[in-house]
Amino acid sequence: MSATHTTARRSWLHRAILFAATLLLTRVWALTIWEYRNYIPPNFDSAFLCGMRDTFFGWYSIAFYAHIVAGPIVLLLAAFLMFTGGRGPLASMHRRVAKLHIAIVVTVVAPTGFLMAIRAHAGPIAGVGFASLAIATAMTAVRAMQTAKQRSWVSHRKWATRCFLLLLSPLLLRLVSGLASVLDAESETFYRINAWVSWLAPWLIYELVLYIRSPSLRPLPKGSRHEQVSNSQTSVVPARLHPG
């Protein structure tokens, strides 16, 4: 099998996986929006609000409604940014949308997520997980903005991807929770684990992919300029050890 055929096959496979994942996450996103019918007005018999009748008041309810309104919007904006990539005729729009996206993440989504984590279902272990997610999301959004201003585009894409993965984590949380419910494996312990794994796992997998694709791990192609420089540098060593 030729290298060109292998590369084309891998490219097709990557597109197929991306398309399938996009369909799945879109369905979860739509189901999440559909669940909002239980939040306005609050239905304390629904899955998320169950048992929160005594705590759903004051600053928590404000943070909750701000979060559920801003969350889907910022996720759509992030998807637009990821798929446009800031190139071509949409470059100008990409920059404007990016500014709006970061503003919403830093001023609404992350702070309200942090506040909601204080009264998280399943206690402080889950709460610390969600609070850490809120901090990490804000941090990656700010770093994406900083690297864009510095025109460090490779670094910018990495930080933007990290932010996008963290914004997707609530969908993964719901997906895994739904699967656990179907398998009758749902419990407070499982929810605590899911509160951490739903965002740490995608992030760590992405960092692993970056590490594997790191140029320092790839063998230098024969005859390449880098290999010639490397060979010339190593060939100098014996000359220094054995001066004529």
Image: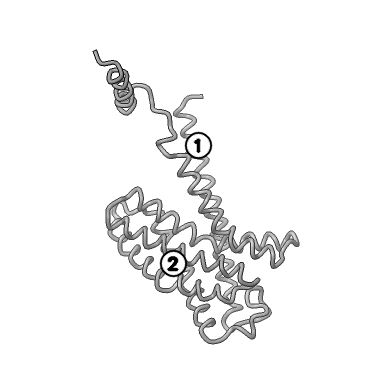
Callout 1 amino acid:
Arg
Is 219 placed above or below 125 here? above
Callout 2 amino acid:
Val
Specify the quadrant of the image occupied by residue 117: bottom right
Is 78 placed above or below 215 here? below
Q: Which mark is residue 173?
A: none
Q: Which residue is mark 1?
A: 10
The image position of residue 23, as x and y in percent, is 55, 55
Quadrant including the C terminus: top left
- The mark total stands at 2
- CA gap between label 2 and label 1 equals 31 Å
In the image: residue 129, left or right of residue 220: right
- Residue drawn where x is 65% and y is 81% of the image: 44
Q: Secondary structure at mark 1?
A: helix
Specify the quadrant of the image occupied by residue 105: bottom left
The image position of residue 20, as x and y in percent, is 55, 50
Task: Tell me if label 2 and label 1 are in contact, CB under 8 Å.
Answer: no
In the image: residue 240, left or right of residue 73: left
In the image: residue 143, left or right of residue 174: left
Decide which of tag 2 and tag 1 comes sooner along the chain.
Answer: 1
The image position of residue 26, as x and y in percent, is 54, 60
Q: Secondary structure at mark 2?
A: helix
- Residue drawn where x is 56% and y is 62% of the image: 171
Is 224 placed above or below 118 here? above
Q: Nearer the viewer, residue 117 or 179?
A: 117
Q: Which mark is residue 74?
A: 2
- Residue drawn where x is 53% and y is 87% of the image: 58
Q: Nearer the viewer, residue 174 or 139?
A: 139
- Residue drawn where x is 51% and y is 64% of the image: 133
Color theme of the render: one colour
